[in-house]
Amino acid sequence: MADRCHHSGVVLTLVGPTSGHIHAGHGWNPGLKWRLISGGIAAVTLPPAFSLALSDSGGGGGGGGAAALGILGSAAVVLYSGSMLREIWTAPGAARRHNERLEEAASFSIAPLLGRAPGLAIAGRF
């Protein structure tokens, strides 16, 4: 159960912040690209950094390699988080601009006609 929850959280941090941009037709945007890049860097650097740092072969310290990988991986996590926050911040505006363009593009109205012969009128704007 814990594995499914962990994987769901990862998927939600990738797709969730971009959902407004996906709605606006801009799913492949800079924030998503930076999250994919930084997430990949973190996934490649952090496990070996922890492994080196905890290994007994290097006296438990892991040497400079562990520190370098740890710094790179930590920077990637910070970049991932910043990109995710940027997407959360900009998604509502992207969705709103998209919806405004849709409203301007086409609209239809149905209205009752009153008078000698009642009926319905359909008006449209393209």
Image (tube, rainbow, N blue to C red):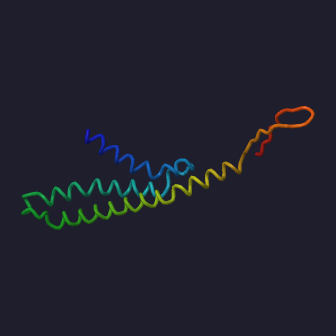
Q: How many numbered circles are shown?
A: 0
Q: Is residue 22 left or right of residue 66?
A: right
Foreground of the two, 29 or 122? 122
Q: Is residue 107 left or right of residue 17?
A: right
Quarter location, residue 110: top right
Q: Residue at x 34, y 47 (%)?
A: 9
Q: Locate residue 36, reporting x and y percent.
A: 39, 53
Q: Quadrant of the C terminus?
A: top right
Q: Quadrant of the N terminus?
A: top left
Foreground of the two, 115 or 42? 115
27 is higher (above) or lower (below) than 73: above
Q: Residue at x 6, y 63 (%)?
A: 59
Q: Residue at x 48, y 58 (%)?
A: 30
Residue reaching furthest to the right: 116
Quarter location, residue 3: top left
Q: Locate residue 4, reporting x and y percent.
A: 30, 40
Foreground of the two, 49 or 88? 88
Q: Is residue 4 left or right of residue 113?
A: left
Q: Locate residue 39, reporting x and y percent.
A: 34, 55
Q: Is residue 70 left or right of residue 35?
A: left
Q: Locate residue 24, reporting x and y percent.
A: 57, 50
Q: Residue at x 76, y 41 (%)?
A: 109
